[in-house]
Amino acid sequence: GVSRWFGRNYSFRCQPVDYSYNPEAVRVAELCWWYYICKLTEFTDTFSFVLRKKNDHISNLHVIHHGVMPLSVWFGVKFTPGGHSTFFGILNTGVHVVMYSYYLLATLGPNMKRYLWWKRHVTSLQMIHFVVIMLHSFQLLFHESCDYPKFFIWWIGLHAIMFYLFFTEFYKQQYGRSPPLNAIFEKKMN
């Protein structure tokens, strides 16, 4: 389960990468590589869109997300397999389970349309998960004693910001208004 991926002693405040050959560190590294393989399998939805000539489903967000993530995850897993970044992999996997469950229902045909009322909520969930990833990553900037590579703190945090901004635009295009989280900030600013 989740505890197997995180390891027994995972710290949400600072989790250095264990580069040893200790069995738990090797298991976590293997699970990180499986996460990378999952990022590659996500290309199948793009291929299905192309084969079914559903070009309207292939947005800039879709192309950028599927183009950037496999390369970024490979880079992260190659040099920091495990450690603090494990959190974003777990969270991202959970969000993708929800998202692909929605897509599965959507592909089952028009008789499923009444069960697809939660599309907007899936998008909101994705955006919330980027905020949580930002906070989890950038908190390490305030823990000078944490032995997690600073480059990857910025790498993960900036990716989360980038995807949050892309999803904000997607939300506005799809639903004709700002996402709920943005609306809260907009009210406080006025």
Image (cartoon, rainbow, N blue to C red):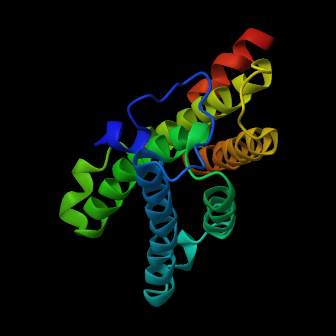
Horizontal and vertical percent position of residue 126: 52, 42
Q: Nearer the viewer, residue 141 or 52?
A: 141
Quarter-of-image position of residue 136 = top right
Horizontal and vertical percent position of residue 110: 24, 66
Residue at 68% across, 32% down: 137
Q: Nearer the viewer, residue 45 or 42?
A: 42
Determine the residue located farthest toward the bottom in the rendered image.
51
Determine the residue located farthest toward the left in the rendered image.
111
Residue 29 showing in the rendered view: yes
| Quadrant position of the C terminus in the picture | top right
| Quadrant position of the N terminus in the picture | top left
Residue at 63% across, 67% down: 59
138 over 50 or under it: above or below: above
Q: Nearer the viewer, residue 94 or 64?
A: 94
Residue at 21% across, 59% down: 112
Quarter-of-image position of residue 145 = top right
Residue at 32% across, 44% down: 117
Residue 179 showing in the rendered view: no
Quarter-of-image position of residue 16 = top right
Report whether 22 appears left or right of 110. right
145 over 150 or under it: above or below: above
Horizontal and vertical percent position of residue 155: 76, 47
Horizontal and vertical percent position of residue 26: 46, 54
17 over 179 or under it: above or below: below
Report whether 174 appears left or right of 112. right
